[in-house]
Image (cartoon, rainbow, N blue to C red):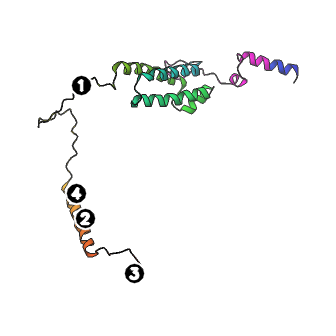
Amino acid sequence: MGRWVEQKMFGRWLLSGGRSAGMLLARVKETTGIVGLEVVPNAREVLIDLYDRTLREIQAVPENEGYRKSVESFTRHRLQVCREEEDWEQIEKRLGCGQVEELIEEARDELTLLAKMIEWDDWGVPAGYEVEVIENDAPIPKHVPHHRPPRLPEEFFKTLEALTAAAAAKSSDNPPKDGPPGPAQ
């Protein structure tokens, strides 16, 4: 290689902060297009940090809780994509959940919710807690859902009775043959 080419490549390397030339060619986002949502130039690093924090803090939630399983699952997936991709456009494309700045907002919101969930201990039932069981015919308040299916229409029972009678008549006309089925004689 000629000296001029080497100097040019070294210059590119310096301009990129010692990173690969691929990083130098990455597009710079100028705006999110969303009012009030500023561009985060180091969005990938911010996301990785937030996802790592989420995975550390979710450990306070019991392992068998659906909330923990769900948060761990999508957070691990998003973290993996962020670690595999250097470019913000590729992260957005692979995750398909909006812009990286929106993902940052979501991750921060999840951390806030996680702290509240741990504080509220939604999955814990206090020792000695007793459930009130109502064993009388007191009317159920209107705001409480009634978990009783509605009565089936009379037409259903008539149809069922007709089908049952037809099946019984057919089976009495053709009693089952003894032995294995064989060729007709």
- Mark 4 against mark 2, which lies toward the viewer? 2
Percent from the top left, x then y, of residue 74?
49, 30
CA distance for labels 3 and 4: 40 Å
Q: Which mark is residue 62?
A: none
Give the mark, 3 or 2, whose residue is nearer the N terminus.
2
CA distance for labels 3 and 2: 29 Å
CA distance for labels 4 and 1: 44 Å
**Disc 2 marks which amino acid?**
Leu
Residue most extreme to the right: 2
Identify the residue position indicated by label 3 in the image.
184
**Disc 3 marks which amino acid?**
Ala
CA distance for labels 2 and 1: 51 Å
Q: Residue at x 83, y 20 (%)?
A: 6
* Left or right placement of residue 142 versus residue 173 in this view: left
**Quarter of the rendering containing residue 82:** top right
Q: Residue at x 35, y 75 (%)?
A: 179
Identify the residue position indicated by label 4 in the image.
156
* Category of crowding for the residue at label 1, using alpha-carbon neighbours closer than 10 angstroms: few (below 14), some (14–19), many (at least 20): few
* Secondary structure at numbered mark 1: loop
Identify the residue position indicated by label 1 in the image.
129
Magenta part of the chain: 9-38
Identify the residue position indicated by label 2 in the image.
163
